[in-house]
Image (tube, coloured by chain):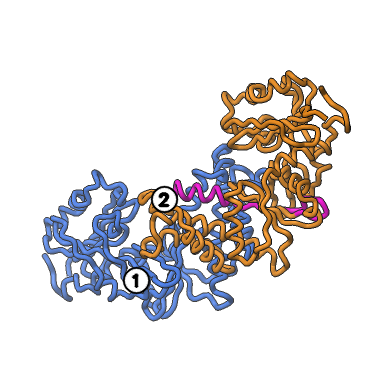
Chain colours: A blue, B orange
Amino acid sequence: MTATPHLIGLDWGTSSLRAQLFDAQGAVLETRSRPWGIMHVPDGDFAAAYRALVGDWREAQPDLPAIACGMVGSRGGWHEVPYADCPADVHSLAAGLLRLDTGCGDLHLVPGVMQRGALPNVLRGEETQVFGALELEPDLAAEALLVLPGTHSKWVRVRDGRLTDFATYMTGELFAVLREHSILGRPAAEAGPEASAEAFRLGLTTARDAGAEGLFGRLFTARSRVLAGELGAAHSLDYLSGLLIGEELRSQVAALAGATCPPLVLIGDAALCQRYRDALALFDIHQVRLLEQATRAGLWRLAQAAGLLPTSGGSHA
Amino acid sequence: MTATPHLIGLDWGTSSLRAQLFDAQGAVLETRSRPWGIMHVPDGDFAAAYRALVGDWREAQPDLPAIACGMVGSRGGWHEVPYADCPADVHSLAAGLLRLDTGCGDLHLVPGVMQRGALPNVLRGEETQVFGALELEPDLAAEALLVLPGTHSKWVRVRDGRLTDFATYMTGELFAVLREHSILGRPAAEAGPEASAEAFRLGLTTARDAGAEGLFGRLFTARSRVLAGELGAAHSLDYLSGLLIGEELRSQVAALAGATCPPLVLIGDAALCQRYRDALALFDIHQVRLLEQATRAGLWRLAQAAGLLPTSGGSHA
């Protein structure tokens, strides 16, 4: 078997566009990326951006299949893909792929997932990471809690190979808007922000110890502790980060209601995942795995489930 | 007794400056206001602003006492006044007045209050409303819970005539920054916001029913309910307002831990207080008083306690 390309996989999110060329075994032959998230596509021309990034791959192999996940399939993306229902598995997601004629070959867009019921919820992009994680660590399929921290952190439950339900915490976005636009960001803006593991920990324990009252009545401590002289202005952002991540964890631990935590996996940026792992230790959760590269594994798995890949042994060369 | 001025009282906050001229009984003879909150004082010249607003009153009666409460006494105001300690009463506040030579007579600045301990907290301006409320409704002095909703809502406990402790909720500021700067504000910005009592109620009950998990994992429903087609984009801001006020109330009810709620008084803007009263009803709290004009009563009471007023029967005329 030579290193013949078998699939183009795109991770096209809010802030960036990444393309990967897969070989017959799902290993990555080449990666390219551009800062062309869906809000930053040059001239808003998705087709031109797509052609600019992968046009030469397509010309070399016109029938190479292509798949894309992420916000490219949202209303503000290239083309809206209806959400798959929750619970979802690889087959329901594969069945929900939307085939888009790009003018440069077909591109299959992965659907997001909607949880209906009393508290509707949505995700888009994370479904691919979830099934990528199950591909990389098959023992998780029986039962797992997958945590994808970020702008909107997702806590995803998996049972019997299905994505059964999930929660959203706007942790990263809240941190950013409070830092930039609220009174809580001012002390650090004036003093110049400095990292402080101690301030981060104090924020975590302050949120953890709020109990059923929750963080809301303690958020202002990111300012009042500075005024009281017990938190350095420069460290107040790490304290705020600790408050918000701490509230996310406190809420999820409360949701467990005393039940044992299922195997827990952090997926995403290594530094951010390490931050969450440190935080989880303060909540007495020590058995935590970290996973990277879940998206590429998920794109491969979904393309496979959708029958996009050439049958075993076939080649486009 | 003629209507001779006895006191100038200023409420000088973040967004506005209000001056009142009191008669010998503490009734208001005249009111003036300017949009000269401490962030918007013309040329940052507090003395000139003061002179422009009350200079003629001072010229007519050069020894007329003057008192001011609010953010004018903060670090970013005219002159910083050290916080009084918690618990505080009218006498400790009166003792903490800072006498400022304005170049146009003395002005006495009321100190804010700092709560020290494990969770430090501060207020500035609300202390005057609190003791004004006790002046207006003396039966509250024994025990009361005073709620001052706004940018930073304060929940203040009074016992035996003393301000014993308080909590801060950044409800108004959070609403503003989420509306202006987060993804939660977008649907209404695009559709054009419309009031909806029903959406407000749905937000309140969604927060109320979160239990110990708290609002954080439900905040995103201000978007996901729109995506799921069950909340109108135009109504999503009232829903968000309900979520935030609901979390404030849920947290305070949790803090009661089953104890009976003390007599509860809402102080401030009538429309906002009515919104809170409606919200409290959904938490089965129905005995709620509304109070306006607490600041002017508090300025009068503090001036009296500080011995600034001419002795009984005296007159400056």
B311 sits left or right of A220 in the view:
right
Q: Which residue is the site of mark 1?
A: A131
Q: Is residue A4 visible?
A: no
Q: Is residue B129 visible?
A: yes
- Cα–Cα span, label 1 and label 2: 39 Å
Q: Mark 1, chain letter? A: A
Identify the disc placed on residue B309.
Answer: none
Q: Quadrant of the C terminus of chain A?
A: bottom left
Residue name at image x 54 percent, y 57 percent? B244
Q: Which residue is mark 2?
A: B193
Placement of A180 over or under A218, stated as above or below: above
> In the image, is B125 to the left or to the right of A239?
right
Residue pictured at 44% horizontal, 47% vertical? B181
Q: Residues within 10 Å of mark 1 (few under 14, many from 20)?
A: many
* Extent of the magenta region: B158-182
Q: Is residue B257 magenta?
A: no
Q: Amino acid at mark 1?
A: Phe
The residue located at (53%, 50%) in the rendering is B174
B200 versus B87 height, above or below = below
Percent position of residue B269, x then y: 61, 46
Q: Which marked residue is nearer to the observer: mark 1 or mark 2? A: 2
Chain letter belonging to callout 2: B
Tell me the quarter of the image containing the N terminus of chain A.
bottom left
Q: Are marks 1 and 2 in contact (CB under 8 Å)?
A: no
Question: In the rendering, at what x and y percent does residue A255 appear?
Answer: 54, 71
Q: Amino acid at mark 2?
A: Pro
Find numbered disc 1 in the image and state the secondary structure of the residue it sits on: helix
Residue A289 at what x, y percent from top left? 46, 69
Residue nearer the viewer, B92 or A267:
B92
SS for dot 2: loop
Is residue B168 covered in magenta?
A: yes
Give the image quarter of residue A109.
bottom left
